[in-house]
Image: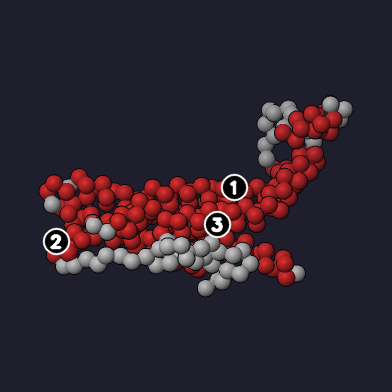
Amino acid sequence: MNTTRSVLTRLGRDYAFVLPGFFVSLFAFVLLVPLFTLALGTAVIWIGVWLLPLALLMATGFAELSRRRVRVWGGRIDQPDYRRGGSGVTGSLRYLTDPRRWLDLLFETLIAFPVRTFTFVVSVTWTAGALGGTTYVLWGHYLPRGEQEYPLAAGMLEALTGGAIPDAVATSFAVESVFNFLVGVLFLLTLPAVMRGLALLDATTTTAALGAGPTSGYPMPSGARVA
């Protein structure tokens, strides 16, 4: 019972970490990329001189959110030092000399969005496979059969038995339901490991790019805190 509860707790924590990350990165991408592009295009008329520091400050804000998400999930990521700006144009230009802020911009626009898109798609697909397969017998009967004479289940059954099973049996709804149920069980049993791997991919990438030094580390599957 304790093991099951521990697995479900870790699974819920991984879901809470992976799924929202896509939407955060999507928002950061659609906000930072146009702003940075506009800043570069208007730099010659000095408007970009004000927009570039703004883009870097916003990227730092998203980077802070990424670090916070890793810590809430249970990871360890140290806070880096940033160069302080100042008032006026000269003070704003100091932000442009901080490599850490440029790294934040690079991460939030070119690294985080592709990684979190991948983790989101895989997590949703794996979850749909687990739920859809195990419950196929309840709703699969209402799907249109189409013109496919040999569905996937029938084709695999024919290959395994050498065509010994009659087509009427191989293409029946019962065989198709059993096949989809077994596939769903496979997805369901591997779901905790897959979600843990996706969460580790996100956390490892974030820690490597946004961590301050070697004391940043990877979260432990059973000892991570939820806070």
- Residue 115 location (% of width, % of height): 47, 49
Q: Which residue of the protein is positioned furthest toward the bottom in this rendering?
A: 227
Which residue is labeled 3 in the image?
A: 199
Residue 48 horizontal side relative to residue 216, left or right: left
Secondary structure of residue under mark 2: helix
Residue at 42% across, 62% down? 213
**Mark 1: which amino acid?**
Thr
Is 155 situated above or below 7? Answer: above
Which disc, if any, is residue 125?
Answer: 1
- Residue 221 location (% of width, % of height): 61, 63
Q: Can residue 44 be seen in this view?
A: yes
N-terminal of the pair, mark 1 or mark 2, is 2
**Mark 3: which amino acid?**
Ala
Label 3 neighbour load within 10 Å: few <14, some 14-19, many 20+: many
Which residue is labeled 2 in the image?
A: 89
N-terminal of the pair, mark 3 or mark 1, is 1
Is 145 situated above or below 123? Answer: above
Q: Distance between the residues labelled 3 and 2?
A: 41 Å
Residue at 68% across, 52% down? 190
Given contact means CB atoms under 8 Å apart, are the residues at marks 1 and 2 in contact? no
Q: Is residue 29 visible?
A: no
Q: Distance between the residues labelled 3 and 1?
A: 15 Å
N-terminal of the pair, mark 3 or mark 2, is 2
Depth order, front residue of 128/217: 217
Residue at 27% across, 51% down? 35
Q: Which residue of the protein is positioned furthest toward the left in this rendering?
A: 45
Label 1 neighbour load within 10 Å: few <14, some 14-19, many 20+: few
Residue 201 horizontal side relative to residue 54, left or right: right
Q: Which residue of the protein is positioned furthest toward the right in this rendering?
A: 164
- Residue 8 location (% of width, % of height): 66, 64
Depth order, front residue of 220/155: 220
